[in-house]
Amino acid sequence: MKIALGTVQFGINYGVTNPSGRSPIQEVRQILEFASKNGISMLDTAPSYGESEKVLGGNSLTNFNLVTKTPFIKRQIIGESEVDYVVKVFYDSLKKLGVKSLYGLIIHQISDIYKSGFEKLYVKLKQLKENGLVKKIGISVYEQSEIDYFLGRYKFDLIQLPLNVFDQRLLKTGTLSKLKEEDIEIHARSIFLQGILLAEPEVLHSQFREAQCVHTRYYEDLRANGLSLLEGALYFIKDITEIDYAVIGVNNFKQLNEIYNSYLNIMNYKNVGIDYTKHSVSNEKIIDPRKW
């Protein structure tokens, strides 16, 4: 497992436990310099992340592989004008980022795959790949049914999916293994559950009261085994061999430095004594940010 740097905080205020708001440009520069020097080579962005692509493009991106996403399509039918719009936004992304090609282009809004005419968009994405403008095309999902739908219908090279201590759905069903059998690169996102897994239970906002009980049990388990909240979240995904990259968003250099050092530490940990399966949560009001 390698670290990929999520950049949503570079362009907009993001995260239910983030009081700092958008990252200042100088902070972004320091983050990117540190990432480059320490082998963090994958950057994840999107047109919907406000100024993120433009901010990134103001820096040297020579040492990075870049993944961006398609824009949201408002209409329920995807016609030529919608395909042209997606392609235009893609070229705008290249311009903002100051690059000639990208590592990955991901369908951002999973609902687009179900729309009439999606095949036209899929063919265009494959053409961008064939023309060398993007190395891999992919999709961002939230749940099992979405993966079941596209497997057998479309060939994607890359998938971005949620996975964390509380949300173990795709791990328990064996779906990660199935994706690897299809030679699909897996980028795990939401490993901190927008910061909830890094916050002590008693300081969680009242809207997450349903999570406090399960979080308290998890927190006590970590303390009994000598792990911090950050180490616990990272250790959970450390040995999931199907994961190629863990997408981690930060607001400032201090956060990245702390995460990176914890990442190095847990790589040497063996058998810490935590049974993560007992901390799996099925309540979607806790594990699915769309339902918050």
Image (cartoon, rainbow, N blue to C red):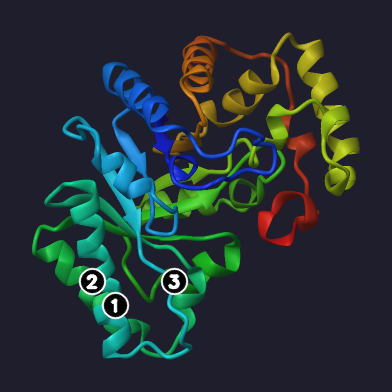
- x, y percentage for residue 199? 74, 28
Q: Is residue 25 above or below residue 125?
A: above
| Percent coordinates x, y for residue 182 in the rendering | 35, 57
Q: Residue at x 76, y 18 (%)?
A: 222
What amino acid is labelled 1 in the image?
Tyr
Secondary structure of the residue carrying numbered label 1: helix
The kind of secondary structure element at disc 3 is loop
Residue 239 in the figure: left or right of residue 282: left
Instruction: Identify residue for label 2.
Output: 88
Work out whether 119 lies above or below 183: below
Quick one: label 3, few (<14), some, or many (20+) residues within 10 Å? some
**Residue that appears at 73% across and 61% down:** 291
Q: Amino acid at mark 2?
A: Lys
Q: Secondary structure at mark 2?
A: helix
Query: Alpha-carbon distance for marks 3 and 2?
Result: 13 Å
Q: Evaluate whether residue 19 shows in this view.
A: yes
Task: Evaluate if marks 3 and 2 touch, with contact meaning CB atoms under 8 Å apart.
Answer: no
**Mark sitting on residue 72:** 3
Label 2 with label 1: CB-CB less than 8 Å: yes
